[in-house]
Image (cartoon, grey):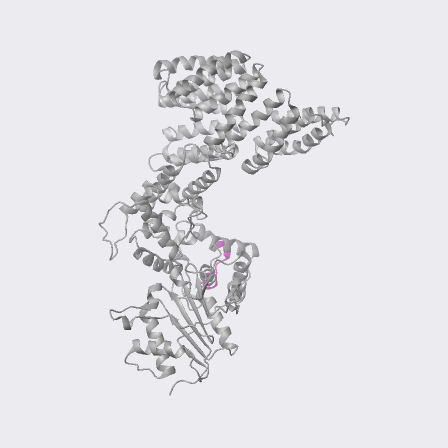
Amino acid sequence: MPAEWPHQVGVLPSRAQSFQHRVEADRLRAAVDDGGAAVLRQVLAGMGGVGKTQLAADYAHTAWDAGGLDVLVWVTASARSPVVAGYAQAGIELCRADPDDPEQAARSFLAWLTPKVGQRPCRWLIVLDDVADPDDLVVNSDDPDNRYSLWPPASPYGRTLVTTRRRDAALTGEGRRLVEVGLFTEAEAAAYLTTSLAAHGRVEPAGQLTALAADLGHLALALAQAAAHLIDSGETVAAYRDLLADRATTLADLAPDALPDEQAHSLAAAWSLSLDRADRLPPAGLARPMLQLTALLDANGIPEEVLTSEVARAHLAAHRTATSQRPAEDRAPVSRRDAVRTLRALDRLSLIDHTPNAPHQAARVHQLIQRATRDTLPLDQRDQYARTAADALMAAWPEIERDTNLAQVLRANAQALTRHADHALYLTDAHPVLFRTGLSLGKSGQVTAAADHYQNLADTAGQRLGPDHPGTLTARDSLARWRGESGDAAGAVAALEQLVIDRLRVQGPDHPDTRETRNLLFWWRGVSGDAAGAAAAFEQLLADRVRVLGPDHPHTLTARMHLAQWRGESGDAAGATAALEGLLEDYLRVQGPDHPHTLNTRYTLARWRGESGDAAGAANAFEQLLADHVRVLGPDHPDTLNTRYSLAYWRGESGDAAGAAAAYAELLPDMVRVLGQVHPDTLTTRSHLAYWRGESGDAAGAAAAYAELLPDMVRVLGQVHPDTLTTREQLTGWQETAGHSTVD
C-alpha cells in the first residue's frame, strides 16, 4: 500500500542550534516574487559554509510543522546517483514503484508529482541539498526516449528548493528564482556566538565576540565550529583569537573534536571539495594554482590584470593540477582567455566572486578560504608563490599611475601579500614591490604613510638582509626622502649624511647608488635653508655626472634640473629660467614630450618664469601644461592637482584675484576627495583659497577661513611648523584688515 500522508522521505537535518533568522529566510517564505508571480522553485546559492543547508532545513521544518505539506522529500544531491536513489525511494513508498528498477521508480515518482484531474491534490516540497553539478539533474542516455530531467515538475501544489555552491546559468530560468546566500551581518554573527555560548553557561565580552566574528569573516560554518571549539576546550575568546592570528596555526588545528549541527565537513574539507570540482571544469587543472595565487593577495579585491598577467599565466602552466582531462606533465602555455575562464570556474563554485565589470577588484575571496588554501602550501612552496604574486603585481603596476583607484588597489594587494608571506619578500633581496608600494604612497600624497612604510622596510631589511645590504641602504635612501617630504627636512639631511658615509664605506665613491644618495643630500640641504650651498654642490655633481655618465644620461639631466632649481632658490630666478629652457629642449629630445621628467621640467620652468616677473606667462604655461597632465596622468593624479594649484596661484599673481579664489574653490573638493581632508596639500589649498578670497575683497571671509584652518594645521603639522606659523600670521593680518582683534 502507498504510504499515507503526511509523509517524509529522506533524513531531514535537525534545526541548527542557535539558528539565526536571516533576510534570506524571509525571501524563501515569500509566496510571490517582485513581479507578482508565484514562486514554486527556488535555488539557494552561495559559497560553502554560508549556511544554505541550515536555511533549507529551517524552511522545511517550518512548512512541515505548520501542516502545510502532504509530502516532504529531502535528497542529498551531491551526484546524480543519490538523486535518482532518493526519488526511487519516494516512488517505492508513495506510488508502489518497482524497487528493482531505480531509474523507472524515479521516473514514476516524478510523474506522480504532476497533478491529475479528479485526484486529490498533493502539497509537496522537494529539497535537493548540495547540488554539485547542474548536469546531475539531467539523465542522459544513448536512447533519446530514456533522457529525462530530474527537476521536479511545475505544479501549483508543489515547491522545489535547491541548495548549491554553483552559480551556473543552467540552475536558473524556467520559473526558478535564485536566492544568493551571503555572510552573516555583524549583528547576526555576534548574536549567534552569544547565544551559542550562553546555552552552555558561557559569557564572553561583547567586544571580543564582535572581533572574533570579524576575524572569521562572519561565515556561518566558521562561527559554528569556533563556538563548538570554545565550548569543548574551555578556552576564552581572546585565547582563541590569538591562535587564529598565529600563522603557524592551521584551521584544522582550530576545528572542534566533534562537528556541530550534523555538519559533514570541516571548513577546509568543505572548500577542498569545491576546489576539486572547480579543477575539473575547463580549462581543467588551473583552478587550484589560481586560487593559491589569490590566497596571498587582498581578499577585498584583486585586479584582473594581476591574475591574467604573463607572470600569473606562467604560474598556472607550471602548476597545473593533474586531472582526467589534463595530465600533470602538461605544461602548455595558458592564454589570457584561459586565465579568465579559470576565474569564472572558481566563481561558479563560489570559491571567489569574479566581477569582470569591476576590473580593479575583479576577484574577491573570503579570508578563510584564503587561510585554508595557504594552510595546504609547504613553506618553500608558499615562498615561491608569494614571489610570483609579487612579480605579478609589478607586471600590472603602471609606471605612471594615471588611475588613482587602481594604484590604491595595487597597494592594498602588496600590503596583504606582505602580511601573508613577508618572509618570501626578503629571501635574497627586498623585492621591488616593497619599494613600489612606498613610492606609490608618496606619489599619491600620503607622505607620512610613505615615510612610515620605508621605516618599516629599512628596519626589516636590516634585520633580515644585514645593515650593509644594498636593499637596506636603498630603503634608508627612500626613508630619508619621504621624511623630508613629510616636513622634516633637517631629519632627512641628518639621515642622508650618515647614509653617504655608509655608502662610501660599502660601495665606494663612484657607485651609482652613492652618487644618488649625494644627490638627495644636496637637495634636502637646500630645502632645509642652504639654497646657495645646494646650488654649488649640484654644480660639482653635474660635472661629475657628465664625466662619468655623459650629457644625456637621465641622472645627468636630473642634476641639471636640481642645479637650476637651487640657482633660482638662491636668488637667480632669471638664470634658473634660462637653464630650464635649455634643459627642456634636451628632455624633449631624449625622453619625449609625455615623459614624467619632461612634464616636471615644464612645471618647474613655468614656476621660475613667474618668479622672474612674468606672472601672466607662468599662468599661460601652467594652463597648457594642465591639458597635457590631464591627458597623460588623468584628472585625479597628484601632479595634475598640483598643476591646477599653481595655475590658480599665478592667475592671482597676474592680477585676477577673484579668478584665483574661484579656481581654488573648485580645486579644494577634488583635493579632499583624492588626498583627504587633512593632507598637507589640501591644507595648503585651503590656505591659498583663504588668501585669494581676502585679496578679492572678502577680508572677513579670509579671516574666518584661516580661523577654521589653524586648528587643523596645528593638529597635522604641529605648532612650530613653518606653514602653521604662516597661517597664524595670515589670520592675524586678515582679522586686522576686517576690523577684528588679534588672535585669542
Where is residue 113? Give x, y as percent. 40, 77
- x and y percent of residue 219 in the render? 47, 58
Q: Does 682 appear in magenta?
A: no
Q: Is residue 458 left or right of residue 186?
A: left
82 or 668: which is nearer to us? 668
Q: Is residue 718 visible?
A: no
Left or right of 282, for residue 228: right
Residue 621 higher or lower than 12, as above or below: above
Count of marks, rendered view: 0
Up-down relation of residue 585 to residue 459 (above or below): above
**Residue most toward the front?**
117
Q: Which residues are magenta?
A: 228-239
Q: Nearer the viewer, residue 25 or 214?
A: 25
| Residue 590 pos. (x, y %) | 38, 20
The x, y position of residue 180, in whole percent, is 46, 60
* Quarter in which the N terminus is drawn: bottom left
SS majority, magenta = helix
Does the image show residue 693? Answer: yes
Q: Nearer the viewer, residue 434 or 155?
A: 155
Q: Quadrant of the C terminus?
A: top right
Residue at image location 40% in from the left, 28% down from the top: 473
